[in-house]
């Protein structure tokens, strides 16, 4: 056969080999159809472990109990017992090493998430005592009058 | 055919037919589950318990490094207000990151809508998150194999492999996917894979003071969440898409989309 047939053919073969070489270097060896087959399980297997290793920022109230047992005990006996500490104070991260102190949020916004009076029949929100978030002791922080860890009106 | 042969064939036929009919008998779902004692994560949302405080959204964003002030979130809470005249209004300010603190309904471009108290027939909150579908449309459309389902049923995105084409964001019927403004890849709820795989709870379920959100193993018949889903009247979102979602809802209304 003539040169003008072979030459382009060599070029094509060369390109195919180059692509296959690049693919073998670039695509990780654990990439492919995993347990769930081609349609839903086509992926790089080690990515599952990468997601498992994602750092957790929230601990839980049990963790706070190691050092702030007074606060935990106070909260557990109060009407706010169901609220985890970290909801109000933010994620523990590596507290007490870093940060040394967790934030203390005394804003009205924190409390009115639950206590702003809304009309919500057929929802659990109805069972929470509500206030008018604008009018109820305007401009003052809630914790000046209410104890956030034990909000009982009798103990005020 | 002799009469004896006829009788014998009839007896065989009847016996055979009754065996196959007994195979159609009602199968107890618990038996089915017990036959397959593996792991399949599922989620249960109780809309009666949700008060719209938004602590789940806050916890999700902080736990998973989703830019706090960017208008994207892996989970959100919707408020539905059904008026006595049948009209439905809905809102979800900032994904409910700061909860619902006002009676005014946020109608985006058309401003804040005031619904008089005595016109409200029903009002409630519906938390939303990725349904980790058994037949995930978003995974099927990915052209590079960057998004996938794990053997325990969680749909994840490989951040090193995603090219950011956005097909999966369009493909999800529930709109749970978004473009991560920092990582520049598609992003979505992982059921807190790093927490549940290490024996923990999802950040949102742990943050919920009222137990409106729960995660469990649907393949374990003794799992409290699996039991609730088997024994209670639960609903799923957008059944008609055939994606077989694994987030179940107690107290779902037809108004919820």
Image (spheres, grey):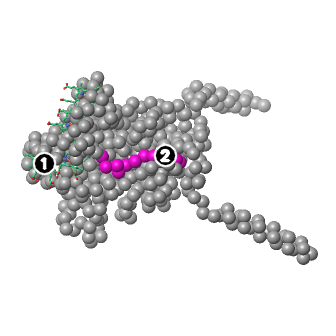
Residue closer to the observer: B111 or B232:
B232
Q: What secondary structure is marked by label 1?
A: loop
The image shows residue B162, relative to residue B51, as above or below, that is above
**For residue B27, above or below residue A58:** below
Q: CA distance from mark 1 to mark 2?
A: 43 Å
Residue neighbourhood size for the residue with mark 1, other residues' Cα within 10 Å, grouped as few (<14), some (14–19), many (≥20)? few
Q: Nearer the viewer, residue A145 or B84?
A: A145
On the image, the x and y values in percent for residue B177 come to: 41, 46
Tell me the element at label 2.
strand
* Up/down of A105 relative to B53, above or below: above
Point 39% across, 52% down: residue = B45
Can you see residue A19? yes
Q: Chain of mark 2?
A: B
Magenta span of residues = B209-220
The residue indicated by pointer 1 is A154
Image quarter for residue A94? top left
- Label 2 Cα crowd, 10 Å radius (few <14 / some 14-19 / many 20+): many
Q: Percent from the top left, x then y, of residue B238?
A: 44, 58
> Label 1 marks which chain's residue?
A
Q: Residue at x 72, y 67 (%)?
A: B18
Say above or below: A108 vs B253: above
Question: Residue placed at 18% from the left, 65% from the top?
Answer: B116
**Residue occupying image coordinates x 59% and y 47%:** B36
Which quadrant of the rendered structure holds the N terminus of chain A?
A: top right
């Amino acid at each position: 056969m003539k040169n003008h047939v072979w030459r382009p053919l060599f070029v094509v073969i060369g390109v195919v080999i180059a692509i296959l070489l690049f693919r073998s270097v670039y695509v990780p060896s654990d990439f492919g159809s995993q347990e769930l087959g081609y349609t839903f399980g086509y992926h790089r297997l080690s990515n599952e472990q990468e997601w498992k290793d994602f750092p957790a920022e929230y601990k839980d109230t049990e963790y706070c109990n190691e050092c702030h047992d007074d606060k935990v005990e106070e909260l557990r006996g109060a009407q706010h017992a169901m609220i985890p500490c970290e909801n109000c104070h933010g994620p523990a991260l590596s507290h007490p090493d870093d940060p040394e102190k967790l934030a203390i949020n005394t804003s009205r916004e924190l409390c009115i998430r639950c206590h702003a009076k809304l009309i919500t029949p057929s929802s659990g929100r109805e069972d929470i005592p509500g206030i008018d978030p604008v009018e109820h002791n305007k401009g003052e922080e809630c914790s000046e009058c209410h104890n956030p860890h034990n909000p009982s009106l009798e103990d005020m | 055919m002799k009469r004896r042969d006829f009788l014998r064939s009839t007896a065989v036929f009847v016996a055979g037919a009754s065996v196959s009919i007994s195979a159609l008998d009602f199968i107890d779902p618990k038996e089915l589950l017990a036959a397959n004692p593996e792991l399949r994560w599922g989620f249960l949302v109780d809309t009666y318990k949700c008060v719209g405080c938004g602590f789940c959204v806050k916890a999700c964003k902080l736990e998973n490094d989703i830019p706090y002030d960017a208008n994207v979130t892996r989970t959100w809470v919707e408020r539905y207000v059904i008026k006595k005249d049948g009209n439905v209004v809905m809102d979800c300010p900032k994904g409910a990151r700061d909860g619902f603190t006002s009676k005014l309904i946020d109608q985006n471009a058309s401003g804040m809508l005031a619904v008089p108290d005595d016109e409200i027939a029903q009002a409630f909150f519906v938390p939303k998150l990725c349904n980790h579908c058994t037949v995930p449309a978003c995974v099927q459309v990915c052209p590079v194999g960057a998004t996938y389902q794990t053997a325990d049923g969680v749909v994840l995105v490989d951040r090193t492999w995603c090219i950011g084409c956005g097909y999966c964001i369009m493909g999800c019927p529930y709109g749970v996917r978004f473009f991560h403004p920092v990582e520049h890849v598609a992003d979505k709820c992982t059921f807190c894979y790093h927490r549940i795989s290490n024996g923990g709870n999802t950040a949102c379920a742990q943050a919920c003071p009222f137990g409106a959100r729960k995660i469990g193993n649907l393949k374990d018949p003794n799992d409290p969440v699996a039991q609730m889903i088997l024994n209670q009247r639960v609903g799923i979102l957008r059944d008609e898409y055939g994606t077989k979602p694994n987030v179940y809802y107690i107290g779902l209304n037809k108004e919820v989309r």
